[in-house]
Amino acid sequence: MTNSKRVLFVLPYPLGRAPSQRFRVEAYFPLLRQAGYPFSIHTFFDDAAWNVLYRKGAALQKAWALIKGFSRRFFMLFFLVPKHEFIFIHREAAPLGPPLLEWIIARLFRKKIIYDFDDAIWIPNTTAVNGVAASLKCFWKVKRICEWASNVSAGNDFLAAYAKQFNAAVLVNPTCVDMEGRYNQTKDQGTSQVTIGWTGSHSTLKYLDTVYPVLEDLSSAFNFRFLVICDKAPSVLLPFMEFRKWNESTEIEDLLEINIGIMPLEHDAWSEGKCGFKIIQYLSLAIPAVASPVGVNQSIVDNKVSGWLCTSGNEWKTALTTLMTDGLLRKKMGMAGQRKMLKHYSLQSNRENFLALFQGWS
């Protein structure tokens, strides 16, 4: 049955590129089709822009990407927005400037905005390569978009608490994986060499600095590999490290090389807003996780059941040593984590929760 309500997805990045957008939005497109919701997609940046966006320099190319993006958005505003009932905005309609587009959509066109975010994006946290643009970000826009939205989709309780200051209609919508599709696999822990692994984007590479000393210390006693899967190589490459450039087509294959997944974080407000997606990826494939006890990590990882929550260097060393030397424990913890992911962090378990964002309005 086709629903009469049309949805326009207003997204920042080209499809298939950014993890947040891929797993929080794009993964649900088949589900919306099944539920009968017709929808359209509009992105700010195209593939050419994405290729230079986080590159050092390239000022003219980045400026041209912004001009094209804003031109596309104004076309969207007058030719696409009027044809849709729901406007689903992931993070922001435009990367720079005040929330003018959102205001026009909500106040002039009087459309129902569903606003989705999965980081503490009201806190300044920009990359050094785009330092000039940071001054034009208008981080205060998040609270305004929350106010104007008909419904807010927040990635965890910390983000939801922020949004509830401005809007009562807030739903906690965790980042999930398709455990009947690509993530329907289980790690074989019977490998001859243990691989400790980390996956993420270039913006989170800085968190590895806290565990490098621990790994260096362990390397003198154990023969292990540290695999880093990222869109950019880390600035530090130790003898036991291997860098693997992230590739969507080999994403699962690469993750399955990992025996122990790690997610170190700093203890700050920005980290509190993280949604623990690295851990969700590890555990869904039955890979035990060792992580910092910050924010949602504490609810995703059951300490000493599906992994370890570690604060000090000694705790990290103990957890990694225990898991490296006990393959049966790795398997047991990984399976425990996989069961929890299936129940709470899979597309299948989150189906009705996601669809609720589009329901209940006349």
Image: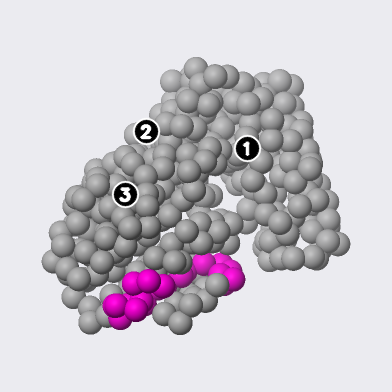
Q: Determine crowd level at label 3: few under 14, some 14-19, many 20+ residues with C-alpha closer than 10 A.
A: many
301 or 98: nearer the eye? 301
Q: Residue at x 74, y 55 (%)?
A: 130
Q: Determine crowd level at label 2: few under 14, some 14-19, many 20+ residues with C-alpha closer than 10 A.
A: some
122 or 28: nearer the eye? 122
Q: Quadrant of the N terminus?
A: top left
- Tell me the CA gap for discs 1 and 2: 27 Å
For disc 1, the marked residue is: 123
Asked whether 253 falls inside the magenta stretch, the response is no
Q: Residue at x 21, y 64 (%)?
A: 322
282 or 346: nearer the eye? 282
For disc 3, the marked residue is: 309
Q: Residue 303 at x, y = what percent?
A: 24, 47
- Side of 285 where 277 appears, left or right: right
For disc 2, the marked residue is: 353
Q: Residue at x 52, y 76 (%)?
A: 237
